[in-house]
Amino acid sequence: MDERKEEESVGASKAELTIAGDKKGAWLSRLHESYKRRTARISAAALSTQGLLLVLFVAAWELAGKNRWVDPLIFSYPSKIANQLWRTMADGTVWPHIGMTVAETVTGFILGTLIGTAAAAALWWFPFLARVLDPYLVVLNSMPKVALGPIFIVALGPGFTSIVIITLSITVIITTINIYNRFREIDSGYVKVVRLFGASKAQLFRLVILPGSFPVIIATLKVNVGLAWIGVIVGEFLVAKLGLGYLIIYGFQVFNFTLVLSSLVIIAAVATLMYQLVAAIEKRLMEGWRER
Amino acid sequence: MNEGPVLELQQLTHVYVNEKGASLAVEGINLTVRQGEFVSLVGPSGCGKTTVLSLLAGLLKPTMGKVLLHGEQVTGPSSQVGYMLQQDYLFPWRTIQDNAAIGLEINGRKTAASMRQVDELLNELGLPGAGGRYPYELSGGMRQRVALARMLATEPSVLLLDEPFSALDLHIKLQLEELVHETLKRRNKTAVLVTHDLSEAAAMSDRVIVLGRNPGRIRAEYKLPDGIREASPIAARRHSGFQTVFEELWKELESEEGGEAGDG
């Protein structure tokens, strides 16, 4: 009933517009056009400034390195880095490093988010457990957990497993705390709706608590992408024989800062790609999910 | 109207306990509601209206006394009782159809046939073709219609209405009152409405219960004259006797509030 009325009112306003003549329509669309032109101009200006800054930075670095204004041994310069990148990609030596680090990072942030969500679910399910564990979680959260890295390496041996565990030690606690807090913040009205239908605790979790926390879980996944990179690189610093973190620490040891900086360029590129991928997945999963 | 009582409240008393202490919310409420009857609870804020409704729904356990539904004691939420809240609380990630069917899903009664019934129900309540849309696409009044469909979908025999119209604009509110009244009468449902709006209570109900506060107990019971009772909410407001009824209810409530003010 409402809907039909709305359509009628839209129809009526359209009719009014035509009665008032084309002038009014043209006037409105002119305003819209100028608004679109204004926003397009701002975006173009921002994009070209961004490009200019990048070009200026790379050019200044190149000049400074080549003319020895800065020590090229320490700071290297872009063409040397590009050359290094090109050579290692062409001869295939860099790919296993990239593959290893990406595998560790992806495993780290996905497992970290899953385990954190499961732990949050356990805390929500058993309020007494949450009450007991609360101070421990606070302490663990404020502790620099990468410091535990050597223990994991000694206990689990150097390699993939201990590096993923170091990553998990960084991501799981904060994930648990964030998602558990969200579980508790779900509007009690929604809980009341399903309880009134006689929902069990499992149904309440599946129908209300979990889907209602979905945006926060996805946001945590994005944060964990960044945290996982820290864990992986630190882990590789400590033990690895393969990976971008290993290349960085090796470069430092042999004073090959071109290798260090080229590895950082790869990390920046791959991390950005990963973040964009997660953002794209978020967009797909969140279709239909709207806050009121 | 000559069938047995649907709802019986016997010496219903509820106490809220927390760190600050124990407070008596409602005390010694006795009330009987017959099949097909529409009863309103009105009273000043803090008179325990919503507490009574939660006790009827089985969300709270009475400290003393009991609630009988069709002669059996209420111990928890049941599919025989529907509840409508002040806000619609539609799940933003579910389509309108899935929102309306959530009760069926919880009770394991979601089938192709029951989903067709949900669609018919949405049509009947003035939401044709809205089933595939999401709550954010609908206006407040339309969302409250979906909440009504959600309540009716499980076919409860008793409906508890917790100020379901109070968050709406006046003309939407009147439209929805009309729709709820007509739908409930046609299905011969029993209903208990909690409201702070006296004219709403008078226009919709067969009987109005005035509650006093501290603690909440029944102050007065007011049976509406047949002419107003049988008319629809909008027609009832235009009835020649409506103003008299309203003023009597007003006086009743005023004396309750006045007594409180006199103490202070």
Image: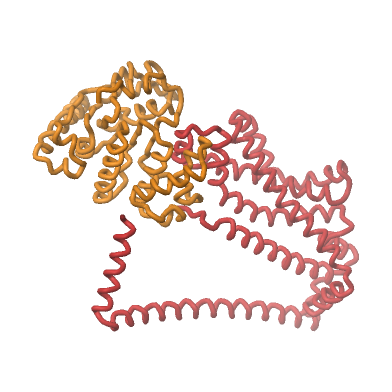
Tell me if residue A4 comes above or below residue A167 in the rendering: below
Task: Give the side of residue A180 with respect to residue A253, left or right.
Answer: left
Residue B179 image point, x, y percent? 28, 45
Residue A218 image point, x, y percent? 61, 53
Image quarter of residue A63: bottom right
Residue for point 45% across, 22% down: B75
Give the tally of numbered discs: 0
Residue B70 image point, x, y percent? 37, 22
Farthest front residue in view:
B113
Residue for point 76% across, 48% down: A146
Front one among A242 and B212? B212
Residue B180 image point, x, y percent? 30, 42
Front one among A110 and B165? B165
Front one among A204 and A172? A204
Image quarter of residue B240: top left
Task: Give the side of residue A157 with respect to residue B263, left or right.
Answer: right
Task: Give the side of residue B81 with respect to residue A134, left or right.
Answer: left
In the rendered structure, the colour chosen for chain A is red
Q: Quadrant of the N terminus of chain A?
A: bottom left
Image quarter of residue A154: top right
In the rendered structure, the colour chosen for chain B is orange
